[in-house]
Image (cartoon, rainbow, N blue to C red):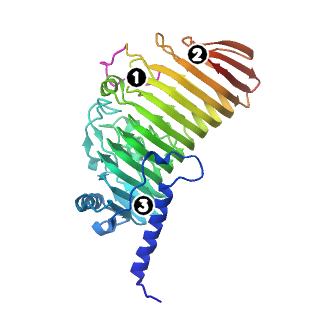
Amino acid sequence: MLYMAPKWRCLLVVAAAIAAVLSAAGGAGAQETCSGAAPAPPKRGAWMSIASFGGAGDGRTLNTAAFAAAVASIARRRARGGALLYVPPGVWLTGPFSLTSHMTLFLARGAVIRATQDTSSWPLIDPLPSYGRGRELPGKRYISLIHGNGLQDVFITGENGTIDGQGSVWWDMWKKGTLPFTRPHLLELMDSSNAIVSNLVFQDSPFWNIHPVYCSNVVIRNLTILAPHDSPNTDGIDPDSSSNVCIEDCYISTGDDLIAIKSGWDEYGIAYGRPSSDITIRRITGSSPFAGFSVGSETSGGVENVLAEHLNFYSSGFGVHIKTNSGRGGFIRNITVSDVILDNVRYGLRIAGDVGGHPDERYNHNALPIVDSLMIKNVQGQNIKEAGLIKGIPNSAFSRICLSNIKLHGSAPVRPWKCQAGHCLSHSAGNRQNRLDEAGRIDTRSTKGTVWALVTCL
C-alpha cells in the first residue's frame, strides 16, 4: 500500500469536497432549472488558501490585507482556467475586498467571512450612474463587503459557509439618523458577466444583501439569506439593470423585500437606459415584513420578460408587489407570476403606481411609467388579511393585467380587492363582474373568509 503523508491526505480530501460541490453547482438536477444562464466555470488551474497569505481564522485578526493579497496573486498568475481561493473553517474577520476575473471564492463548511464593524475602514465609491447619488443619501456610497467590477467568470460558492455582514452597527446608525453615506451591500457585482453565487449563507447585511447591477448571465442558487425582520432595507436579492438572470432554490428571511427587480431611479435611470430583462425566479421560500417578490419601485430603465414561479411566502406584508411611481418613466411589462402559496400575509397582491420617493427635485413629473401585460395566476393563500390592491396612475393606464385562479382565505372575512384610478374592480360580498380597464373581465367572488378571482383577458 502506498504511504501518503497526513498533510497530503488532508489536501486530497479538501480537493475532493470542492470538486463535488463545484460539480453539483454546475449541473442541473431533475427539477426544471435556469442554471444554464451562466456557464459552469472551467477547471481552475491553481488552488490557494487564504491562510497562505497571512490570514488567520480566529475571529480577531483583521484579514483585509490577506484577501487583497490573495486576489492580487490570482490576477497576476493568470493560471489556465483561473484560480480558486479556499477559505478554511474558522471566522475570517475582514474589511471590504474586491474579486478578480476567472476566480472561485470557496468557503468550506464552518468557514465564516465576517465583516468588521469598524465603519471607518470601509472605502467610499461613486454612486451608480443609474441612481445619480447614493440610494439613501446624496453623494458617494460605501463599497460592498465583497465587490466586483468589470469581471468575467466569477464563482462564489462553498459548503454552506457564511458571509456575515454584522449589520447591527449600520442599522443603528440608520435608525439614529447618523449615517454619513449610503450603507454597503454584502455582495455587489457591477458590469460583470458569467457569475454564479451558490451554496452559501448570507446574514445580517448592512443594506441589500446581493446586488448584481449592469450584469448579464448571472446564476444565484441554493442560498440562505437571513436578517432580523426589523433590520432596515436588508433586501435579499436585487437584480438591477441586469439581463439573463436565474435565481433558484433559496430560503430568504430578511427585513425588506426578499427579491426586488430594479433598473435605476428616475431621471438617472431614464438617461442610463439599461433595463432588467429575461429574469427567471423559481422555488423561493421565505418571510418578510414587506414583499416576498417585487418589481420596483426603481424601474426607470424598464423591467421586462420576467418569470417568477413556485414561490412560498409566509408571515409577510405582501405576497407579490409590483410598484412604480409618477416620475419613474420606464416600463414594467411581460411579467408572469405563477404557482404562489401564501400563509399569514397582509396583502396577497399589490400593483401600485404611488410607491417610492425621488432622488432629488430635478425628476420629470411627467415621466409616467408604462405597466403592461402582467399575468398573476395560480395563487393560493390562507390567513390572508386583505386580498389585494390595484392602484393605477391617472393618464397612464395599466393595461393587460390578468389575475387567474387566485384563491385567498382568512380566518376572519378577507377584505375585498381595492382598486383605484379606474384600473380594477371594487366589490363587496356577493358576485359581481366589472371592467378591468381595456384588458378584460374580472369575475370576483367573496364568501365569508374567502376571496377569489377568475379572470378572462382579452
* Relative to 278, residue 31 above or below: below
* Relative to 337, residue 458 above or below: above
Magenta: main secondary structure equals loop
The kind of secondary structure element at disc 3 is strand
Q: Amino acid at mark 3?
A: Leu
In front of the other: 453 or 384? 453
Q: Does residue 202 belong to the magenta stretch?
A: no
Q: Position of residue 452 (x, y in %)?
A: 70, 25
Q: Position of residue 300 (x, y in %)?
A: 38, 25
Find disc 3 in the rendering and name its residue.
Answer: 107
Cα–Cα gap, marks 3 and 1: 39 Å
* Relative to 420, residue 54 above or below: below
Q: Does residue 358 belong to the magenta stretch?
A: yes
The kind of secondary structure element at disc 1 is loop
The kind of secondary structure element at disc 2 is loop
Alpha-carbon neighbours of circle 1 within 10 Å: few (<14), some, or many (≥20)?
A: many
Cα–Cα gap, marks 3 and 2: 50 Å
Q: Amino acid at mark 2?
A: Ala
Q: Residue furthest left?
A: 76
Q: Position of residue 116 (x, y in %)?
A: 34, 53
Position of the C terminus by quadrant: top right
Give the residue drawn at x 43%, y 56%: 157
Labelled disc at residue 330: 1
Q: Which residues are magenta?
A: 352-365
Give the residue drawn at x 67%, y 28%: 406
Q: Which label's residue is closer to the chain start, 1 or 2? A: 1
Find disc 2 in the rendering and name its residue.
Answer: 439
Asked if residue 415 can be seen in this view, the reply is: no
